[in-house]
Amino acid sequence: MNAPSRKPPSGKPVVRFAPSPNGLLHLGHARSALLNWQFAQAHAGTFLLRIEDIDRERCRPEFEEAIFEDLEWLGLSWPSPVRRQSDRFDAYRTALSELEKLGLVYPAFLSRAEIKAKVRENEESGEAWPRDPDGAPLYPGTERELSADQRAARIGSGAPFAWRLDMKRALEGLKTPLVWQEANEKEGDGEPYPAGPAEWGDVILARRDTPASYHLSVVLDDHDQGITDVIRGQDLFEATAIHRLLQELLGLDQPVYRHHRLVVDESGRKLSKSEVDTALAALRHAGHTAYDITRMAGIDADLRPFASPA
Ligand code: GLU
């Protein structure tokens, strides 16, 4: 396994803003993009834009165009060409087959409804079913022990399936306790934080027709693009445990993580792409300036790229 490195030889950070073009960017995205951009500026580093468009059904070109337009309007710039995850499917397939060779993934055939039914059945008999940090029931793992022939037969029958990580087996191979380096919104490289990927159970790493889930693609691209500091919302804090595990299994570099506070609505809930009035485009059309947006996103607007509002 490669020794994980945290800083490029130049010592200059490389950061990325990595939105999915499945809706319009809102104030929460502006906060993330601006924090990344300002971090790069403050440390003479590089700010990259990455389009996370592995979900071919939900991602649309018009949302991608809107991302470019909104970020340019905010005053941000980034090097070309911009990476699109949809161009990286071969690399994701290679990593998945590496995990398959290690015996760490298995094809899982239960549909969402079947998982629910199984959980209900157990809970009705008085047994609480474990849930992941997002509240979803853990996968029952019924197919973990199928033989190679049984797997091939089920795949051959055309049944839809997802590739899931055999979490227990993956953890058995670890030699040292898993931690990640968490700096939150502070300067410096932060503190080691204990990662508990087992809480997520057998997570999905790919589907029959999509060679990577978010978890797999994000660690592969962060490594491949030499990302030194991952600056993203607190809502992805717990998922970092899965990312660290995948980095260990695949010999990938680990960045420093800087999870930041989220922008919340009046009732304290995180913003969603379906709430149109906090979309950057809507705020812009309502007459707000980039400077206003920056302040609304809880960012120090007197740092570049914003001229102070004389
Ligand atoms: N694509 C993810 C999103 O739009 C962000 C991934 C990340 O920053 O790790 O929520």
Image (cartoon, grey):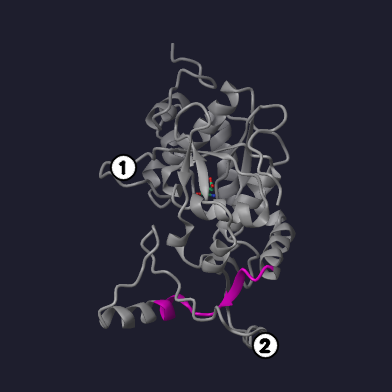
Which quadrant would the C terminus be assigned to in this image? top left
Q: Which residue is mark 2?
A: 149
Task: Classify residue 69 as left or right of residue 282.
Answer: right
Is residue 108 found inside the magenta-colored segment of the image?
Answer: yes
Picture residue at 66% right of the left edge, 43% below the top: 4
Q: Which residues are magenta?
A: 102-115
Q: Nearer the viewer, residue 24 or 145?
A: 145
Is residue 264 part of the magenta span, yes or no?
A: no
**What residue would you read off at disc 1?**
265
Residue at 39% in and 40% down = 262
Mark 1 vs mark 2, CA separation in Å: 52 Å
Q: Earlier in the sequence, mark 1 or mark 2?
A: 2
Q: Tell me which residue sits at (66%, 39%) in the image.
A: 5
Question: Residue 115's spot in the image, x, y percent?
Answer: 42, 77
**Can residue 288 be seen from the camera position used here?**
no
Residue 204 horizontal/vertical position (percent): 54, 66
Which amino acid lies under the numbered mark 2 shown in the image of this protein? Asp
Q: Please, is residue 149 above or below residue 307 in the view?
A: below
Q: Label 1's element?
A: loop
Q: Position of residue 117 (x, y in %)?
A: 37, 81
Quarter occupied by residue 130: bottom left
Residue 303 visible to an observer of this rendering: yes
Label 2: how many Cα within 10 Å (few below 14, some 14–19, many 20+): few
| Amino acid on which disc 1 is placed | Asp
